[in-house]
Amino acid sequence: MKINFTLNNKSVKTDIIPGQTLLKYLRKNKIYSVKYGCDNGECGSCTVLINGKAQNSCLMLMHTVNNCKIETIESFSDHKKMHPLQKSFLDEGAVQCGYCTPGMILSSEALLREKKNPDEDEIKDALAGNLCRCTAYVKPIKAVQK
Amino acid sequence: MKTIGKKTIRVDGESLVKGKPVFADDIKLDNPLYIKILHSPIAHAKIKNIDTSKAMAMDGVVSVYTHKDFTKHYYTTAGQGYPEPSPRDFVILDDTVRFVGDNVAFVTAESVDIAENALKAIKVDYKELPANFDYTKAMDSPQIHPSEGPTGIHDVKKNIAANLEAEVGNTKEALAKADFVFSKEYSTPFVQHAHIEPHITLTWLDENGRLVIRTATQVPFHVRRIVAEVLDFPIRKIRVIKPRVGGAFGGKQEILNEEICSAVTLKTGRPARIEYTREEEFYAARSRHPQRVKFTFGLNKKHEFEAMEMDILEDCGAYGPHALTVMSVTAQKALSLYRCPNIKLVANAVYTNLSIAGAYRGYGAPQGFFPLESIIDEMAIELNVDPIELRKKNHVRLGEEIPIGKIIGEGGEGFPVIVRSMGLTECLEEGKKLIEWDKIKALKQSGVIRRGVGVAAAGQGSGIPGIDMGAAFIKMNEDASFNLLVGATDLGTGSDTLLAQIAAEALEVSVEQIIVYSSDTDFTPFDKGAYASSTTYISGGAVKKAADKIKAQILEVGIKILGVKSAKIVGGKVIAEGGKSLSYEEICTKAFYTDEQQQIMAEASHMSYDSPSPYNATFADVSVDTETGIVRVNKVVSVTDIGQVINPQMSEGQVEGAIPQSLGMALTEFMIFDKKGAPINTDFNNYHIYTAIDMPEIVVKFVDTHEPTGPYGAKAVAEIPINGPAPAVANAVFNAVGVRIRNLPITPEKVLKGIEI
Amino acid sequence: MWSSIREIIIPTSFEKAIDNKIEKNSVFFGGGTYLVSAKDKNINNLIDINNLIDDSIELSDNKIIIGSKATIQQLVDKSITKLSEVAIFSNFSKNIRNQRTIGGEIAQKNVRSDLFTYLVALNPQLQIRNPKKKIISMLEWNDNGIIEKIIFNKMDIDSSGFERFSLLQSAPAFLMVAVVRKGLELEIAVSGKVEKIFGHTMQLDDFNKNTLKKIINDSVKYFDYDHFGSIEYKKSLIATGIQRAVGQI
């Protein structure tokens, strides 16, 4: 079965392996920012943006992303500039081990695209699916508020 | 100071926010073998027969290894210095399994899925043996480890992995004379690190036939040594690389799967990869040692502590990595916080047929501070004195020597401990204000939800005295930048940044001038690894020494080039008395190419017989639902004395992150085993850690002290904040509803039962 | 990697979908969060029905009609009082909510789910295609056919209560109670860490101390003595839960 989608603004046409998850596909294709943490949809380290909405790529089969716009954090910066969320995460000290960071930034970005000035509860709600064992979420939440 | 104490962005931060491929698994191996482990479903059994024929016949399966493929060599998986103070009771594959999750066989295959499917095709005949899951009965239960073979087990017949006893003065007499005597027993459960990145190791042979191990580890040098030993392969042919690690907290202070992965590469010549699933993380990795601790205190009329007796029983699980050292730390830290002329310690670590316990942030101290800070509160309440005042009255003072420090090190004799920096009173007073202690205590409460507030004090250490060593190497470049090579291991803890700051401060340059490369056994000098809160204090000490040497060299070379008798370094320049000067850049450029040619470089090692304790006061504000017993934490205040704060944001981050781990141990996280010793909650849904919506309000502060023996006055910060929240919550629950829980976790039923009484 | 999946079928009509399902080892695939998480090795074919169903949410004066493809997040965004509130309880992760569908939630019958427990008490109407259209109550549905729409009485949702007990706000509830007043009747559902959901219908008039006691004794049989508490404790929780849930109506 062949599918089309855009990945980080590049269009992709590919054959799929029916049972392959988007997480596996992305990592096989060197999109390493999307991570394996539980393979169960519980930790959020595999977060991607599908048509602007944050979802867990470990629970998505390839055929479901046909005609979708997929974004990962690789598209948020280039060698010259960084996305404002990336800057604020750095600035606030919201990054410790960094494993959950791409997922958190994507989930935050999805929220900010929906609502320009979310309150603290809305930020917590957006980040609730991204587990972090290093930061207790304190500085990441501050980073998004900025 | 220019850099120390100032906000500094992490030197590795950019790669992390950009999602760059910097973690262990972020590379493509060339034609690798994937490894899956067959774990035992039975808690205790002899393997009578393993039939691997069906698995071997499967398409894509390359080999199946059983205990028959390895010579029986006993080692410890604990990532510790040599000689390891842990029992050598582990074999890479044994003919006996001792817990549900123990290794039975490894499959190597062309894909992870094939390997996984092959596991089911392996037929194992087990002869089931009696199993014990209750550590209080361990000494009378059937022997778990053989009498012949393992070494370093204290009493193998009684399942005692380790034993520790110590005495100062005479507690028996002191207790007999005491005006008040209190004796209570407490316990803490198995909890998990739950680092989001699982254990992952990749191995391959490089162009010269050397084994390269790329692994998420806290202890690259110990990995190298222990893999060499287990596989009988020379150290000089092994290179261990630690890439970015996705959290560890002690769970990766272990040789876990590196030896298996290396064995496959050495046997086949092919690259190999082994990654634990989240499920395996929960039952076949490591966890915190459960402990039962009995404290007996004797106080005089003035409420000063005259006698402290501590009796520890520790559950190792089926094997004993870190068994002795964890309970040593439990004892040493708990018995070093308060003055007391008579101290007695009896500690035993025992085997059971449950998951293996290992290193976990705090390393015994949380298991000690929960009972200690609970009994202090219980005594305060009985004596009708303020629990904060009781602590203030009795904690050790600046300048004092702590008697137990000399007697208990981390697994054996220690070294004299003198308190050279101490801010605990300020921590207590500051925290009391921030939690609004008086206000909450004065609340007139009625209604279903009751509020309470609790406090706990704690200490820790900064490295293992007399043992821990770290080294640093610095070389200069033409643009006055410096390469800093350190063995020290950054787990997300920020040590790369912190060490860069120390170097920058010493060299009088900005942090951007320091290029850090760490934890590669081929390029970086030795460092024992990231554990025991040693990186700032020990590795930082080495960096400062090396940086000072570099500065001296720059000065020396500058003087020679200028041809003057003396000069000074001011603001990145060597300035002679006459006014002649050379910048750092000029000096290095000339030294490379034209004058006094040399590479300005220096190295230094550092170890210490001191391990100054940071101090912490944690306060918790809780609400208890008196109809259901459910406890919710509203706010946690953590005030710490860590000497000079080197990087405020990072230090805050360390304190903040430790809090939910401790709250988890108190309230929500606990590994559950069924009647046959099989773990039940092996995913995040059922072993539930704090998410963003569960967090209480957190307030973090540091008090101003200076530790003379630490680099720029700094002490450790990484472990101490995990000690206070659990006892603070237990004390707050008592304050709210008058229920004292002595056995964690504080489950709703325990609370409700207490209320109804 | 769900290695047992051999084929993904995307039928163009309900008839074709039902036909394909006759083969063993095949399941209907909607949102996929439950299925892909479980990766059942016995399943070889997925029949993707996402082109056949829709995600509309129609609110009228007395009914709420939701297409089975509607995601949990869409439910939440529509702010349908209690329904949206309960939907978040069992799906604290917004990532999951963006993918999980209400159709999938009903088909999966996850007894640990707050939302499903609440739906058991609400017992909405389902519009099923088998392949002919049929309207049947959720509890009467025999799992045959494809859920096309879920039809709620707005009044039921407005006169309902839900109480959950968990160690953390985001943690799965170890005990929960849903209560819905439908006219003169009371629907009660009790679940949590159980194998089956306890459901009970009674006349409002009959609700008193004794009948409550019987409900508690009957429902607690579905629970085990485990680390969340003893049977006695759970009984008291059920009582508290019912009282609080009823109080919300």
Image: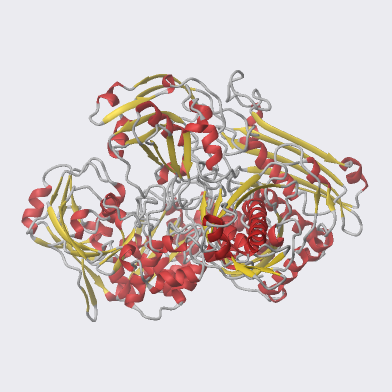
The mark tally for this picture is 0
Measured from the top left, where is residue A133 in percent x and y? 50, 57
Q: Is residue C23 above or below residue B146?
A: below
Depth check, front residue: B625 or B465: B465
For residue C119, side relative to residue B230 (left or right): left
Does any portion of residue B635 appear in the rendered image? no
Residue at left 68%, top 32%?
B162
Does any portion of residue B443 appear in the rendered image? yes
Q: In this view, does B448 lie above or below B191?
A: below
Depth check, front residue: B372 or B63: B63
Depth check, front residue: C83 or B139: B139
To which quarter of the image does residue B52 belong? Answer: top left
For residue B494, side relative to residue C57 (left or right): right
Q: Is residue B328 above or below residue B370?
A: above
Depth check, front residue: C76 or C187: C76
Measured from the top left, where is residue B87 in percent x and y? 62, 30
For residue B598, side relative to residue B283 (left or right): right
Measured from the top left, where is residue A107 in percent x and y? 36, 67
To which quarter of the image does residue B312 belong? Answer: top right
For residue B494, side relative to residue A34 (left or right): right
Q: Which colour scheme is used?
A: secondary structure
Measured from the top left, where is residue B593 in percent x and y? 51, 56
